[in-house]
């Protein structure tokens, strides 16, 4: 399991907190059901099987997680 620290997801204000909850939900539903999130020094830490590179996530209907292997291949969506 790898840990990724997300500086932009703080426990407050509420919008940042909800952003972290949305992110862990996306990762858990689409990539790694065993993913976990925690707060450390007011930063969100995502623990999952994802690599240490920053993930690229596209939000929207029918669009989900896109990893480096199929980043240019829209047929995977």
Image (cartoon, grey):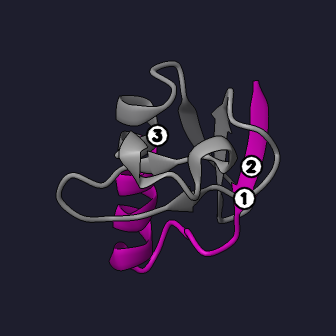
Marks 3 and 1 sit apart, C-alpha to C-alpha, by 13 Å
Label 3 CA crowd tier, 10 Å (few <14, some 14–19, many 20+): many
Q: Is residue 51 left or right of residue 22?
A: right
Front residue of 40/53: it is 53
Marks 2 and 1 sit apart, C-alpha to C-alpha, by 8 Å
Going by the picture, which residue comes out furthest to the top?
34
Label 2 CA crowd tier, 10 Å (few <14, some 14–19, many 20+): some
Q: Is residue 17 magenta?
A: yes
The percent coordinates of residue 72 (x first, y second) are: 57, 58
The percent coordinates of residue 55 (x first, y second) are: 63, 55
The percent coordinates of residue 18 (x first, y second) are: 34, 64
Q: Is residue 37 magenta?
A: no
Residue tagged 1: 54
Mark 3 vs 1, N-terminal side: 3
Residue 44 is tagged as none
Marks 2 and 3 sit apart, C-alpha to C-alpha, by 12 Å
Mark 2 vs 1, N-terminal side: 2
Front residue of 6/49: it is 49
Task: Report how many numbered discs are placed on residues in the image.
Answer: 3
Magenta segment, which residues?
1-24
Residue tagged 2: 4
Provide the secondary structure element on which disc 2 rests: strand
Q: Is residue 54 left or right of residue 33?
A: right
Residue at 82% x, 46% y: name it: 52
Provide the secondary structure element on which disc 3 rests: helix
Callout 3 touching callout 1 (CB < 8 Å): no
């Amino acid at each position: 399991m790898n840990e990724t620290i997300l500086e932009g997801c703080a426990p407050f204000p509420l919008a940042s907190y909800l952003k972290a909850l949305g992110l862990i939900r996306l990762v858990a539903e689409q990539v790694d059901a065993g993913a976990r999130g925690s707060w450390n020094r007011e930063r969100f830490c995502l623990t999952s099987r994802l690599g240490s590179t920053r993930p690229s996530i596209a939000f929207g209907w029918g669009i989900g997680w896109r990893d480096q292997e199929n980043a240019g291949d829209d047929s995977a969506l």
